[in-house]
Image (cartoon, grey):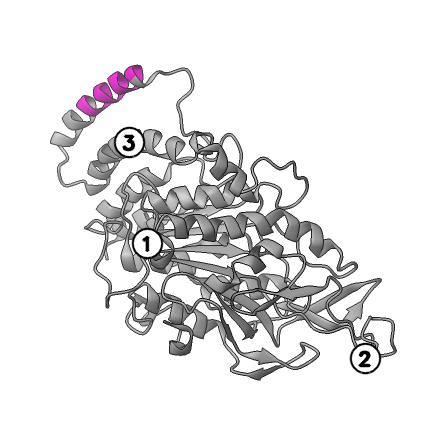
Amino acid sequence: MNQFSLQRRTLLRSLFSSSALLMPGVLSELCAASEGGEPLSPHRPHTEGRAKRIIFIYATGGVSHIDTFDPKSMAKGRDGTGEDKLMGNIFGSARNKRCGTEVSDIFPHVRGVMDEICLIRSMKASHFDHSEATLGMHTGSPTFARPSMGSWVSYGLGTFNQNLPSFVVVAPFLPYAGTQVYGSDFLPACHQGTRVIPGDNPIANLRPPGSTRDLQKLELDLVDRMNQRHFAARSHDTALAARIKSFETAFQMQQAAPEAFDVKSEPEHIRKLYGLDRTLKGAGSEFGWQCLVARRLAERGVRFIELIDTGSRPNWDSHGEMKDHAALAYNVDQPIAALITDLKQRGMLDETIILWATEFGRTPAREGTNGRGHHRDCFSIWLAGGGFKPGHVHGATDELGKYPIEKPVEVHDLHATVLNELGMDHEKLTFRHAGRDFRLTDVHGRVMQELLV
C-alpha cells in the first residue's frame, strides 16, 4: 500500500470517529473508492444462512440472571438476611404456558413470548469489569481493541440498502467502553457503526439549514459541474472521484433516513403494541421508539442493528438495590416482546436474529443494602428467530445461580453460532492485519448446533 493510501485510510477513520463532518452514506462511498470496490454491496455468504440480518439488544450494566431469566428460589432462608447473605429472586416468577420456561415477574411480556425464544442460562462472561466484559461481548476481545460484531457482519455480508448505513446503533447514551463497542478498528472505516440518538433529530446535520430540496439540487448540480471540470485534469485522483460521488449519495440519504425514523407514520395499533402511548421516565424510557425503529430499519435492508437501552449510568448495575431492576425492566419488557411479535406477524422473524445480552450476571449473595455484585461465571442471554430453537433452554446453573452445571457457553461460541446462522463460517471470515489473519472468534469458538432448528 502506498503512502497516499495509508494517509487516506487514516483520514477516513478520523472523519468517521468525529461523526460530525460526514454522513455515513458519504463515508461509505469514500471507503469504496479507497479500497477499489463496493464494500457495502451485498456479498454472497459462505453458506445458505437462515438469517439475513441481526438485531442486537444490549442491556448495559450486568442484568441479574437470578432475578430475571434464571430465577432462583428464596427458600431455605435465602432472603439475603442470613449469615451467608444468599438471596434468591426477589420478584417472583412464573412459567410460559406453552413452553414452560420460567421467567421473573418483572418481564411478563417477554415471558409471554418465550415460546419464540432460545434461552441460554450457562453463559460465561469474558471479564468481571464492565468495560472489558462489554468489549468481550461486542468484539470477542476484552483486552485489545478489535472490530465489533456488527462491523464483522457488515464486512462479511454488506448491506441491501446503499442509502442507509449497514450497521446502525440506536443508543440514548454511550455504554461502557464508549464508541469501541461499535468501532471497526482495522476493518475498513465504512463498516463502523453509525450511532442514532432516539428523539426528533436522530442523525445530526442530516438536512442543510435554510435550503429547500430543489435549491439544494441546484447547488449540488453547480458543484458537480465545477468538480467535474476540476477532475478532468486530475483523473488519476481516486480521492477526488470518490468525493464527487459522495454528494449524490448524501443527497439520497437525506430522503431515506428521515423516512426510516418516522415512527409517527405507523398505525396506532402498532405504536400501542410497542408501548409508545405510555408515559415513561428514566433510563430506557425511549426503548419502545428504539425497537420500532429497529423493525423499520430491518425492513429497509439494514444488516446489523444494535439497540442499547441505557448508558454507563444509570443502568442495570444494581450494587445497592435490586428493586432498581423492576423499573428498568418495565421500560423495555413490552417493546422487546412487541418486536418479536411484530416481526413474526410480518413474516420477518425467521430471517432475523434477535440477540438479547448483557455483559455479565450478578452474585447470588446480597451486596450493600439489597444489591448484588458482578458475577462472570454464569449469566443468561437469549436469541429469537434466525434458525434458533424456539421455546428451548440451553444449559443450567446450580441452585444458587453461582456456577454452570450443564453446557457452559463462551462468548466465542455465541459469536460463531450467530455468524453461522447468517451464512458465514467464523473460521473463514478473516481480515489480514499486522501480519496475521484476524477473525471475530480469534482462535476459539464452535457452532452450537444444539441451539439450532
- Dominant SS of magenta comes to helix
Left-right relation of 357 to 353: right
Residue 335, compared with residue 452, is above or below; it is above
Residue type beneath disc 1:
Pro
Along the polypeptide, which appears first: circle 3 or circle 1?
1
Residue type beneath disc 3:
Gln
Query: Residue 252 — which label?
Result: 3
Q: Residue at x 27, y 49 (%)?
A: 40
**Which residue carries the number 1 mark?**
188
Q: How far apart are marks 3 and 1 (CA)?
A: 22 Å
Badge 2: residue crowd in 10 Å (few <14, some 14–19, many ≥20): few
Whole-percent x and y of residue 296? Answer: 40, 42
Q: Which of 34 and 129 is in front in this view?
A: 129
> Circle 2 — which element?
loop
User: Are discs 3 and 1 less than 8 Å apart at CB?
Assistant: no
Along the polypeptide, which appears first: circle 1 or circle 2?
2
Q: How many marks?
A: 3
Whole-percent x and y of residue 38? Answer: 21, 49
